[in-house]
Image (cartoon, rainbow, N blue to C red):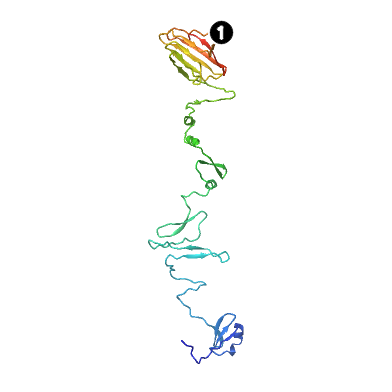
Amino acid sequence: MGVPSPRTPVRVARGTYSVLNTNKASLEEGEVCYATDENRIYIKEGGNIEPTTAAADATKASLSGATFTGHVVLDNAKEVRLSETDANGSHYLGVKAPDSVTADKTFTLPDGHGGSGQVLTCSDASGTLGWTTPTVYQAADADLTAIAGLTSAADKGIQFTGSGTAGTYDLTSFAKTILDDADAGAVRTTIGAGTGNGDVTLSGAQSFTGIKTFNAAARAEVTTLTSSSNATAVDLSLSNDFKLTLGENSTLSAPTNAVAGQSGVIWVTQDGTGSRTLAYHADWDFAAATAPVLTTTGNATDALCYSVYADSDAGVHVLITAVLDVS
């Protein structure tokens, strides 16, 4: 479209509002003027300059604030965003509906704020919210907070190290085996230390140092010896006390695993036939270098009390003192 010709330019009075208002008498009725300090257009009407104001649009809300008398609908799961102050940044907290809503629901807020420790809950199916004090949750506690601050890991136990403080410790596989034991007897059974009242069963070699005082019997197992091919082997690591029933003439072989300081008794019993003899290896020593002659009566028992007094490379020496016919 071309520019019409001829054309008449429109002249507009310009100046600050104060200047325009002071000189308004010189303006024609209906004349337009522009206040440069307000960036606003005025019109001379009835002797005054009046600002031009568009008619209010009842379908639009003012950006500076408005009162809504009906429902406000945000379509397509859009958010209501509550922004922080401009001085702090541009972050906001938003509230929105889920992408899929099964049925219409209005949540009604309670009147006032809740008390300390209360939470906002839905008190009925209508969506009415209310402040309630939880009854199914653990209240804040210093001990629980201390535990919550620990780092969990395999084979670790938890212990309190002070009031409101906690730590972890190593929990070994062995320790776990006794955690479910109800009493000391059960613990002894688990660790293989006997089951009686104070009884202790030790397996394998044990070494004790210092003086040991026993206030009850210290009992040694009596190990059975057997004569085979007229020879009786004696392993002193098996026990302190032994028993041998002679069913043939036999020789007490050189003792094995002899350690100086060990002592005990070898009980020798004739079988029902009797008249069995017992000879001795050279490691067995006797007073006056004379071996005892055993009782030969059937079922008779003699006691050979022994004590190991040397176990060096030069040879083993076990002294026997016989107590005959103790049956």
Across the whole image, how many numbered discs are drawn on residues?
A: 1
Q: Residue lying at the far left in this picture: please name it.
A: 102
**19 relative to 196 in the view: left or right:** right
Name the image quarter holding residue 213.
Answer: top right
Give 188 or 47, whichever is nearer the viewer.
188
Looking at the picture, does residue 106 appear above or below residue 28? above
Looking at the picture, does residue 90 appear above or below residue 286? below
Q: Residue lying at the far front in this picture: please name it.
A: 314
Classify mark 1: residues with Cα within 10 Å, few (<14), some (14-19) or many (20+): few
Residue at (59%, 87%) from the top-left corner?
Answer: 24
Q: Position of residue 60 (x, y in %)?
A: 46, 74
Q: Position of residue 300 (x, y in %)?
A: 45, 9
Q: Position of residue 78 (x, y in %)?
A: 45, 66
For the question of whether residue 41 can be seen, the reply is yes
Looking at the picture, does residue 70 appear above or below residue 241? below
For the question of whether residue 309 can be seen, the reply is no
Instruction: Find numbered disc 1 in the image and state the secondary structure of the residue it sits on.
Output: helix
Give 151 or 204, whichever is nearer the viewer.
204
Residue position marked by numbered label 1 in the rendering:
288
Q: Amino acid at mark 1?
A: Ala
Give 311 or 180, whichever is nearer the viewer.
311
Q: Position of residue 293 (x, y in %)?
A: 49, 7
